[in-house]
Amino acid sequence: MVSTDSWRMQKHAWIAAMLAMVTAYADVVSLMRYHSFASILTGNVIMLCRAMVDPQTNGHHFSFYLALCASFAVGAFLHRLCENWWPNRGGSLAAVPFTVLMLGVETWYLVTDEDAIYDDPVLRWSVVLVSPIFGVIAAACSTGRMGTHTTMVTGHVLTMSGVLGNLPFKKLTEQDVKKVIMSGMVLAGTVCGASLGAWALTNKTLHNVLLFPVPIVLYILMWLHDHLCQPRSLIKKVQGKIREKPQELKSETDSQDSQDLEEDDAESPDDLQSQV
């Protein structure tokens, strides 16, 4: 059944794995294209510090990485605003403007000469318009019912290592199994996405279109995250109706019994004598 815990867990795990795969793919391409990460904030902060010491690092000033981190934070901030205004719909709503922005950036790349996409200093700054959608995804996944980051490999490795380390001392609980499945799916998605991105980069003629489908796929996944993982209002309504039906039948039966008793009590002694 759709409402069972196991089925909800499967939906969570598959959506987390797909988000991890698309995000890892985008990071591999963005690392080659922008010399920065679209979604890994830790990597961008490390590059920021490196650029502060050596301003010529990767041809970027430290302000580039600072703007990139700030744009990621803007995405997470807008998600929280939307989530407060429209509960359980924050991810899919906050992703709309940033999906349009990223599509605009990728259209810009489509009309740019293939040989110039890595040397144009203005195009390099376009990653600042790409990063916010990944801030939305990170915030939605970590604070929603999924309750996990889809871009943090370290956390998932620690989760799996901790569970395996407890095996000699205690039996696995259902919660432990769920954690291992979720972490394993995210790790598998990350490996697949990064490998796909590396393979795609081997084709030199497609570099300006590699990220074009990413915003569309990310928005679809965010919509699925909000509408499949989080809300179950329709299911709850149906279950409520099912539970109400026996109560309504019981109430009708009790009402009919009370009415029959009242009619019996209302019969006069003369009527009883005449019946005799």
Image: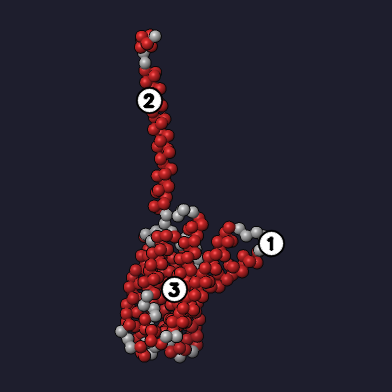
Look at label 2 and name its amino acid: Gln
The quarter holding residue 266 reads top left
- Name the image quarter holding the C terminus: top left
CA–CA distance between discs 2 and 1?
65 Å
Q: Earlier in the sequence, mark 3 or mark 2?
A: 3
Residue 57 seen in render:
yes
Contact (CB < 8 A) between labels 2 and 1?
no
Give the vertical position of 253 relative to 166 (above or below). above
The quarter holding residue 267 reads top left
Q: Earlier in the sequence, mark 2 or mark 1?
A: 1
Residue 45, given in percent of the width and then of the height, sits at: 48, 79
- Kind of element beneath mark 2: helix
Label ID, residue 22: 3
Label ID, residue 169: 1
| Residue located at (55% from left, 64% from top) | 181
Look at label 1 and name its amino acid: Phe
Pick out the residue farthest to the left: 111
CA–CA distance between discs 1 and 3?
37 Å
Residue 211, given in percent of the width and then of the height, sits at: 39, 78
Residue where numbered disc 2 is placed: 259
Q: Nearer the viewer, mark 1 or mark 3?
A: 3
Q: Is residue 267 left or right of residue 187?
A: left
Q: Nearer the viewer, residue 137 or 54?
A: 137
Residue 207, given in percent of the width and then of the height, sits at: 39, 84
- Kind of element beneath mark 3: helix
Look at label 3 and name its amino acid: Val
| Residue located at (38% from left, 22% from top) | 262
Q: Earlier in the sequence, mark 1 or mark 3?
A: 3
